[in-house]
Image (cartoon, rainbow, N blue to C red):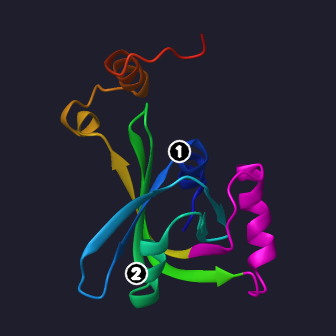
Amino acid sequence: MLSNEIIKYIEKSILCWLATADADGMPNVSPKEIFNYHGNNLIIANIASPQSVANIKLNNKVCVSFIDILVQKGWQLKGTATLLEKEDPNFDELEKILLKMTNGKFPFSTIICIHIEQAKPIVAPSYLLYSETTEQQQIENAVKAYQLSLFK
């Protein structure tokens, strides 16, 4: 399920957005900075996510989205979340992947592990409405709109 194309966008994305729902079905979406993949699972360090964790304990069906903000393409992944504690036999292996990203700056004692069941691409409407839209044009438009200076 996690194709090379999806992995490319995981690696290019700065944040992912995790959607959960509470017992009443009220949605909650929150950004996650430290995330990666392992096998067919997306893994997220639980750094400061008390609402996400509480919701997963009630309803483990989740959705995660991430995009390359300049190209304006990415993926929406849906699946089943599991909360891994330090005692879990897989925790150490997954922790190593996430610790490489944190450089020790973000402590975490649990990992949100999402088994991916569905994946669909996310694309900016420009690509759909104007078939001639290129990724380079999207980058140039984003740089101009947000007054970014790339690689200067």
Label count reads 2
Residue 140 percent coordinates (x, y)? 40, 17
Cα separation, mark 2 vs mark 1, equals 24 Å
Q: Which residue is mark 1?
A: 13
Q: Amino acid at mark 1?
A: Ser
Is residue 85 shown above or below 149? Answer: below
Is residue 69 shown above or below 146? Answer: below
Magenta highlight range: 86-113
Is residue 132 shown above or below 74? Answer: above
Magenta-colored stretch includes residue 108: yes
Residue 127: quarter of image: top left
Residue 152 percent coordinates (x, y)? 60, 10
Which is more toward the observer, 90 or 53? 53
Residue 98: quarter of image: bottom right
| First along the sequence among labels 2 and 1 | 1
Q: Is residue 103 left or right of residue 132?
A: right
Which is more toward the observer, 127 or 103? 103
Q: Residues within 10 Å of mark 2 (few under 14, many from 20)?
A: many
Magenta-colored stretch includes residue 107: yes
Q: Which residue is mark 2?
A: 55
Q: Is residue 84 left or right of residue 25?
A: right
Which is more toward the observer, 3 or 13? 13
Are the residues flagged by discs 2 and 1 in contact, CB closer than 8 Å? Answer: no
Residue at 68% x, 83% y is 85
Q: Callout 1: helix, strand or loop?
A: loop
Residue 36 percent coordinates (x, y)? 63, 58
